[in-house]
Image (cartoon, rainbow, N blue to C red):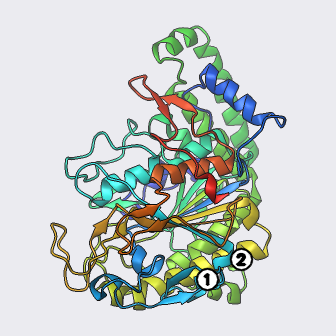
Amino acid sequence: MLSILGSRGRLCDSPSRRELLSVGGLSLLGFGLADLFRLQAYADPTQARSPGFGGADSVIFVYLQGAPSHIDLWDPKPQAPAEIRGEFSPIPTRAPGMFLGEVLPRLALQADRFSLVRTVGCKPPGLPNHGSAIYMLMTGHDPGNFSPTGLAVPPSREDLPSVGSIVARHRPADVGRFSYATICGPTKEAAVVGLGQGAGLLGAGFDPFPMYDDPTRPINLEVFTLSGEVTLGRLNERVDLRRRIDERLSTASRNAGEARLGGKPTGAATFDTQYERALSLLHSNEAVRAFRLDEESADLRQRYGMTRFGQSCLLARRLIEARTRFVQITWPARSDDEPAAGPDGSWDTHRNNFPMLREHRCPVFDRALASLIEDLHERGLLAKTLVVAVGEFGRSPKIGAPTTNNVGPGGRDHWPDCYTALVAGGGIRPGQAYGESDRFGAYPKTNPVHPYDLLGTLFHALGVDPDIEYRDTLNRPRRLIDHGAAVQGLF
C-alpha cells in the first residue's frame, strides 16, 4: 500500500487525509485563445507591465478565522467616543505616522516592513455572517448557493476554486515541491469544514496538501513513506505499467470522451496526475524536510511562540524555503466559536472583546506574525514572498450594541463594511497605510478596497493576470476574481 495517501483517520472533523491529499496537477479546464495571447504578452519582457507585476515568487496567506477587531488592532480611533475607541491606546510604530493598538507591540517594531490596507470592505449576500464572507475572501466570487442568511454550505466540486488552487494551476511549483499547502487548521463555519479551501470545479489535482497536525509536537510524516515491502523503484514500475495500459485502452475512445466532457480530462487522468505529484514528493527530501521543525533551534522556536499558530508560522517559513508556492495558515479556532481563554481561541468576540484580545489572542498573534516577517527579512525571503494577513471581516465600531448576532457586554459584532489587511513583501511598498477609514472606523473615507481587489493584488504580485477566464460547470466564462483589479497604490 502507498502510505502517501494516508490513513482513513479523521482530522478535526474534516475529510480524511486520503480524501484531501493533492499536490497540484494538470488543468481540467483549458485556456481560451484570448487567455493564451494575454499570457504570451505578459511573458514578453518587451511588453510594458504595471508596477509590481510578478514581484513575488510565493505567498503566505494568514487567514485570521473569526475576524479580529480592526479598530483594536490595526486602525485605532483615539478621538472617537469611549463606546467606539474601546480600552486600548494607540502606540507609534517604526513606520512614520502609522499607529497600532497597544496589543501589537512586536508588530509595531516591524511596521517599516509591512503596509496596512485600512479600507477593505464589502456587502456579503444575506446577513453579515461568516460563511458568505469566507467564501468571498477565499474564492474571489459571490456565493451563489448559500442560504439567504449567508450561512455556509458544504464544499463540492461545483464550487469555484480557491485562490490557492488558482495559484497552483497558473503558477505551479517545481516538480517535487508543494504548489498549495494548508496548515494550522481547516476553515470551519458551524458544521461546515473546508469552506473555500479546495479547487472545486478545477478538480482534485489542484486541492491543497493539508497538514493540520499540531506543530508544537513532532509532525507525523508517515504520509510520505512507503510500506516496507514496496520500494520506490518498484512503485515507479507499477505506475509506468498502469500508464501504458491506460494509454492503450483509452486511445479509441479518447476523442469521443473529450467531446462529451467539453475537453476536460477524465477522473482517471486526474488520478494519474495526483500519483505523479505524489511520486515526485517521495523523491524530494527537501520538501518533506520542511515539516521537521526540530531542525530549528530552541531559541528560534521560542521566538515564534510554542503555540499551534506560532509554530505554524515557522512551518510556513520552512515551506517557503522549500519552494512551496502558496501556503495558507488558518487560525485554528472555528470562525463562529464562542471566544475562550487560551492560545487557540476564536477571534469572534461578540462579548469580552478586550480581555480576550489583551490576554489571549493578541499575544499569540503579535509574537508569531512579527517573528515571521522578521525571519523572512533576515533570510532574504521577504522580497519575493508576499505575506497577507486578514480576517473575513472586521468588528463593529460600537461596543456592546444589541444586534441579531447576540452581542454581549464588551463585545463587537460582525462588520464587513470596513476592516484592515496587512500586506508585506513580494514587491509591496512597506511602511504605508493605504486608504483611510472614517472617524469611527465604520466605512472607507478614501481609497475603498474590495476583498476581490485584495486577491487581484495577490495574483498581480505573482505575475498572474486577474482577467484570465475559465469556464464553470454551466460553461459560463469566469474571471479569476468576480470584479475588481490589483491595488496599484500598494506597489
Question: Could you say where residue 71 lies in the image, as x and y percent from the top left?
Answer: 40, 77
- Alpha-carbon neighbours of circle 1 within 10 Å: few (<14), some, or many (≥20)? many
Q: Nearer the viewer, mark 2 or mark 1?
A: 2
- Say if residue 108 shows up in the picture: yes
All told, the count of numbered labels is 2
Circle 2/circle 1 CB separation < 8 Å: yes
Quadrant into which the C terminus falls = bottom right
**403 with respect to 352 (left or right):** left
Along the viewing direction, whichever of 418 and 350 lies nearer the viewer: 418
Mark seen at residue 375: 2
Q: Quadrant of residue 255?
A: top right
Three-letter residue code for mark 2: Asp
Helix or strand or loop: what does disc 1 sit on?
helix
Along the viewing direction, whichever of 289 and 366 lies nearer the viewer: 366
- Say if residue 334 shows up in the picture: no
Q: CA distance from mark 2 to mark 1?
A: 10 Å
Q: Residue furthest right?
A: 46
Along the viewing direction, whichever of 375 and 465 lies nearer the viewer: 465
Question: Could you say where residue 56 lies in the image, as x and y percent from the top left?
Answer: 71, 55
Task: Of the two numbered discs 2 and 1 on the same chain, state the one appearing first in sequence.
Answer: 1
Identify whether 154 is placed above or below 41. Answer: below
Mark seen at residue 379: none
**154 with respect to 16 (left or right):** left
The residue that disc 1 covers is 304
Identify whether 119 is placed above or below 23. Answer: below
Three-letter residue code for mark 1: Tyr
Question: Could you say where residue 59 lies in the image, as x and y percent from the top left?
Answer: 63, 58
Q: Residue at x 61, y 45 (%)?
A: 168
Question: Could you say where residue 182 lies in the image, as x and y percent from the top left?
Answer: 53, 59
Q: Quadrant of residue 427?
A: bottom right
**420 with respect to 297 (left or right):** left
Q: Residue at x 69, y 68 (%)?
A: 318
